[in-house]
Image (cartoon, rainbow, N blue to C red):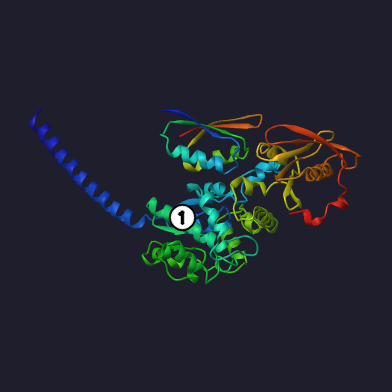
Amino acid sequence: MSPEIIRDLGHRNSINQWYYYQTFTVISSMNTSVENKSRKAVALVSGGLDSMLAVKVIQDQGIHVEGINFFTGFCVEGHTHAIRKKDRARPKRNNALWTAEQLGIKLHIIDVSEPYKDVVINPKHGYGANLNPCLDCKGFMVQRAYAWMQEHDFDFLITGEVMGQRPMSQRKDTMPVVSRESGAGDLLLRPLCAKLLPETKPEREGWVNRDELLDFSGRNRKPQMALAASYGIEDYAQPAGGCCFLTDASYSSKLADLWQARGEKTYEIDDIVMLKVGRHLRPRDNFKIIIAREEGETNFLKGYRKRFLSLGTTSHTGPIALIDGEPSETDLELAARLVARFSSGRDADSVTVEVLQKDGTSSTLDVQPLPSNEVPQDWYV
Amino acid sequence: MSEQELDARGLLCPIPVIRTQDRIEQMQTGDILKVFCTDPGVIHDIPAWCRINGHEVLSIDEEDDQVVVMVKV
């Protein structure tokens, strides 16, 4: 190799070293900058508009957001779609997943149905209009999300809460209770009403700009709708009464009946799913009958025939029914007449009903369908 | 690369999605998970979960009352 070439290579090496040094310095400085600026927030995502907007507002400030969604067993999402055949024609979507996809964020769905029982059974702050323990529920979810945040090295937590929107958990005096009792403290940021609340750590530290947060309050949804429109969001879920069955009067009354019949406040997941299915009638204190309303529910209830005594008409088309409790022979005949009442043989003189025991043995009863005027309204749970 | 199976029959959404998510967390990139379900909701929910979390749905087969979803991690 000629001395010129060697000199040239040496020169290039020194240039390479310089470039390496410069590049290293720039990357190092970028890393420091990234460390300062790239904060991560975990958002409680229900699938409704408010949590969607809260994420958008924080994403707009350059924060990396991931969603968390808790399955309590009482979520309106999913179950009834799966059970009721007539609903299957509607496009089925899980709104939390759909929302996450629209926002371009990851969603972590966490099954909290077992620890959530204590929230439903022993709410420290009591129930709302029905068996909805909203304040305890919010505290529980924020606490769980806060634990997840710490475990996964995220910086703060956001929710789509709006002050004054819900009578229990989203009041000016109860929002601090959630922050305090969950342990999240000032790492809990509510972007949609942050300006109405004391400054949180993400604002104080400059991770987010408080001036770009919002001051929404009350039950009027127009500000949210206007904000959604400004983001070009046209499609979003608007569940009436929220996304929880416990806010529903009819569902709560079935749960109260279950607890009363058992003599204690306990439940399993199958119990609370069953409360979403069929007509529930309690003709006597010692048993309840669950009668399918359509084919989808009939198919669903069939899956429980090894756990419950079941009835079904054989002489006429009709629904399947499950018996919860310990019916006597007379009670069984009454239950059979009720099932016949909801079959196509309701006007017939006699309908044959098959009684299937949990062990698979069966017998039949020929009964006269119960006339509608002999089904008192207070049998309906 | 391994192929695993998950029995989510008799479970209602979102539980099959949660079970899929929890199993995939334990698997390696390139592994295949075959999920057996009865809730037709999974036809939409598992692909949606896969899209936002970067996994690939290889196939969805419906047979009688059963749905089999094949996911590549």
The quadrant where residue A378 appears: bottom right
**Residue B58 spot, x, y in % from top left:** 52, 30
The quadrant where residue A164 appears: bottom right
- The answer to whether residue B40 is visible is yes
* Label 1 SS: helix
User: Residue at left 42%, top 66%?
Assistant: A200
Q: Mark 1 packing: few (<14 Cα in 10 Å), some, or many (20+)?
A: many
Quarter of the image that includes the C terminus of chain A: bottom right
Q: Report the front residue among A108 and A315.
A: A315
- Residue at the left extreme of this rendering: A3
**Residue A63 spot, x, y in % from top left:** 42, 55
- The answer to whether residue B50 is visible is no
**Residue A279 spot, x, y in % from top left:** 75, 48
Q: Is residue A17 above or below residue A225?
A: above
Q: Report the front residue among A299 and A240.
A: A299
Chain where mark 1 sits: A
**Residue A23 spot, x, y in % from top left:** 24, 46
Left or right: where does residue A90 sit relative to residue A341? left
